[in-house]
Image: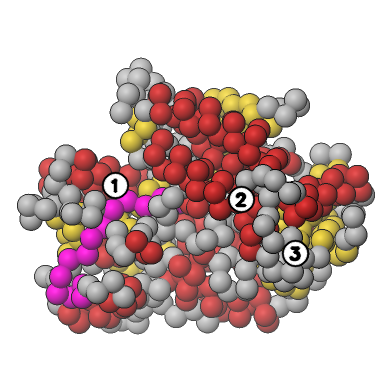
Amino acid sequence: MDYKTIMCDVLVVGAGGAGCRAAIEASKHNLDVIMLSKELLGKAHTAMAEGGYNVSLGNVDPDDNPETHFKDTIVGGNYLNNQKLAEILVNDAPQRIFDLEDMGAVFDRTPEGKIAQRPFGKQSWRRTAYASDRTGSEIMVTLVEGVRKSSVRVFDEVFSTKLLVTDGKISGVCAVDLKYGDYLVFRAKSVVMATGGAGRIFSVTSNAQLDVGDGYGMAYEAGCEMIDMEMVQFHPTGMVKPESARGRLVTEAVRGEGGILLNNKGERFMNRYYPQVMELAGRDQVARSIMTEVKEGRGSPDGGVYLSIAHLPRSIIEFRLESMIEQFEDAGVDIREEPMQVSPTAHHFMGGIKIDEDSSTNIQGLYAAGECTGGVHGGNRLGGNALADTQVFGAKSGESAAEYAKSTTHLGVNRDEINEEFTRLELMLKRKEGVSPADARHELTELMWSKVQIFRKEDEMQYAVKELRRIQKEVVPMIKVDVPVKRFNPGWHQAIEFAHMVTTARMVAEAAVIRKGSRGAHFRVDADPKDKGYYNIVIHKGKEGEMELRKEDLVITKITPP
């Protein structure tokens, strides 16, 4: 196969909040840094984050501090967090938001001119810094400008498909130029994975189209250890209608600003489930409460519930929830006057690549940051902690990758392995008979949504595991592309993604079967009461290619599970 080789010191795969922050940090070390983006620079899913960035500044509630933020994060994570990582998150978050301000980010202010902070679910104080309800967009605009001012070389619309490992150490990646269809090999001394999540393995999701789990699939195939992949957060409030917008995020800021949830009887039903915190209970708790109302016949005609802010002053709504007004105007709803219909939507992966405090993985020279990692958020992420995560561990991974790159040289790569990867991609274009990626993805996403969703049962998950193993064995090798061209061919791109989606879905389902009790976002209607769930589940690829799972003790520094 013909391919072009490109050399660099540090390679960052992914250009969202974590990837951009990692690239900026690595570039400070006078190194050749390349960042790969699957989409156009600035279009990453981070730009869709609305609510805010958790940081214990105490600007609104002076008693807030990192210790309280840490406790809230651990309790919110149902004690499954790696507490060393959680400590880094809460301690570094203040400096990282000041970094963003130094780069030009503009956050909403208090009357005294300090960064404003709003309440978010399951938090002791008003801690979430924000820029109206477009916080992620503000951060991404700032980071993109930071990247452009740096020496980072950006390759956008480049799809990484495989990590290259030489003698247990990272050596680069295989990739495809989506615009022209050219095959590329990027050889690097160190690599940072910042590839985001995988909400698109479910049929209803708030995630962008490209969030299909590429990073999870690539990392697993390369030999990375993965942790707690069963922990998928279903955001309680996604749009219900129109069908084209189903699953689109309705930010937690709506509830943070005083929004209330109502059933078809007009009852504020959260009083029945979590009366002390109401709509600001944990995301998993609110999601289950909504689904219970729907299942018991108290939902809206379209299978959701109602979220109302019509009782709030119009000035608050128009100033702090501007994009929500626009989003629902497109659906014919004026949220200043009438309620929204909402229901849960697949939103965030708490599980992912297992990392240490310096963002390193079990593969030497490979680092990871952001949503593609696991351990920081435990069994359930607090709203607002994700944006903080991208900046804290984005910076940490970039620094670590740069230091490692300065201490080593380029490794050789296995040309047969590279040829095998590009031949695999080429066969999708040449195959005369097989399964279209659209049909295959539909089967996969409906399977995951129906069998490995918010309420989980042993027989349904076992069925999903059986089907996913079949799909991986029989369907993945038969994916074909109807239009056999390489130049910007979305059908080919979807076909390449499908293998990563199946691997990711399998890890979610297989780990969910192993965890017999309910813990965090993993809720079993048939839970074994003897399984308190105070352990992590680690997955890795065995020597014979089989998926191996094991339970591992929690990393505890301060707070012992009850």
Residue 327 spot, x, y in % from top left: 33, 73
Q: Could you say which disc has been placed on residue 168 in the image? A: none
In percent of width and height, residue 216 lies at: 61, 46
Q: Secondary structure at mark 1?
A: helix
Q: How many marks?
A: 3
290 shown above or below 506: below
Residue occupying image coordinates x 29% and y 47%: 287
The residue wearing badge 3 is 485
**Which residue extends farthest front?**
432
Residue 361 shows up from this direction: no
- Separation of disc 3 and disc 2 at Cα? 15 Å
Q: Earlier in the sequence, mark 1 or mark 2?
A: 1
Q: Residue at x 42, y 54 (%)?
A: 205
How far apart are the alpha carbons under marks 1 and 2? 34 Å
Q: Quadrant of residue 66?
A: bottom left
One can see residue 546 in this view? yes
* Horizontal arrangement in the rendering, residue 382 relative to residue 364 (left or right): left
Q: Secondary structure at mark 3?
A: loop
Look at the image and give the residue range highlighted in magenta: 334-350
Q: Is residue 167 magenta?
A: no
Separation of disc 1 and disc 3 at Cα? 43 Å
- Amino acid at pointer 2: Ser
Please say if 527 is above or below 292: above
For the residues labelled 1 and 2, say whether their Cβ atoms are less than 8 Å apart. Answer: no
State which quarter of the image contains the N terminus.
bottom right
Task: Look at mark 2 in the image and give the residue it sits on.
Answer: 436
Residue at x 39%, y 21% (from the top left corner): 531
Expressed as whole percent of the image width and height from the top left, the position of residue 269 reads 13, 48
Q: Considering only order in the chain, which callout, 3 or 1, is on the residue closer to the N terminus? A: 1
Residue 287 disc label: 1
